Image (cartoon, rainbow, N blue to C red):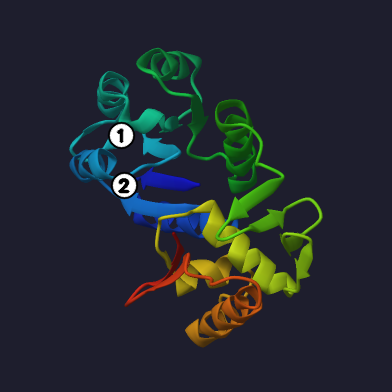
Amino acid sequence: MAILIIETDESRRATVHRFLQRAGYLTDLTPSLAAATTKLAVRHYEFVLLAQTLPDSNGLTLLHEAKRRNYQAAAFILLMATDAVEDRLHGFAAGADDCVARSTTLLELGRRLRSIARQRFGRPRPRISFGAGFELDLAGRRLRHGSHAVDLSRSQFDLLHHLLRHRGRPLTREQLGAHIGKGSEGSNYIDVHSMNVRRALARFAPPDFLQTVRGIGYQAA
């Protein structure tokens, strides 16, 4: 899932960004309302983390605008300076899906994101069909082509699953490495895994859906 983080505090913005990337989310960052409005107009996000106070406006202004324009029905979480009941009520009235104090722990923020995701977007599908007859079984952590099992290592399975979760969106080698827990291994590690995934799939059908995006990384079409 993709999240837009609108936060003025650079340190806090970077901390939340790292935490969410390790949790498997795709993140974009911006410190202002003007830049956020531009991003929301052209990109799809499942979540928007919105600071209550911004240098060029108030977060409530964007909430009102988002409600009017429907911005792909993203879920908005308002990050408030305090946990005052009156402020929370204003946030909910403006259209926020949740209101949390900026001092809320990252673990609690992650829990709230998962809760909203279950309510708004449903639970992940247990199986993903893709390519020419492939099926990824998430519960059993197996990949099949028809009646044949396709052998993948744990990291290769996680890499393929992450790409399929974000079909049509290029993912950097750093994002993929962070997701499979190999962020410190270097970009070559992801290139090797991607090559091996392609080889495993090619035994059964052309892996054309797995594309290299020059200068960025990879994407599943």
Q: With respect to residue 83, does 48 lie above or below?
A: below
Nearer to us in this view, 27 or 152: 152
Query: In the rendering, at what x and y percent does residue 28 appear?
Result: 37, 53
- Using residue 123 as the reference point, say whether residue 19 is left or right of it: left
Query: In the rendering, at what x and y percent does residue 20 appear?
Result: 53, 53
The residue at 48%/38% (across/down) is 102
- Using residue 91 as the reference point, say whether residue 123 is left or right of it: right
The residue at 35%/56% (across/down) is 10
The amino acid type found where label 2 is placed reads Thr
The amino acid type found where label 1 is placed reads Thr
Query: In the rendering, at what x and y percent does residue 54 appear?
Result: 26, 38
Q: With respect to residue 109, does 163 lie above or below?
A: below
Residue at disc 2, secondary structure:
loop
The residue at 59%/70% (across/down) is 205
Nearer to us in this view, 60 or 135: 135
Mark 1–mark 2 contact, CB under 8 Å?
yes
Query: In the rendering, at what x and y percent does residue 11 appear?
Result: 40, 57
Identify the image quadrant of residue 49: top left
- Using residue 78 as the reference point, say whether residue 105 is left or right of it: right
Q: State how far apart marks 1 and 2 are (Cα).
A: 8 Å
Residue 8: mark in rendering: 2
Q: Examine the rendering and report whether any part of residue 142 can be seen.
A: yes
Q: How many marks?
A: 2
What is the crowding at mark 2: few (fewer than 14 residues within 10 Å), some, or many (at least 20)? some
What residue is shown with label 1? Answer: 53
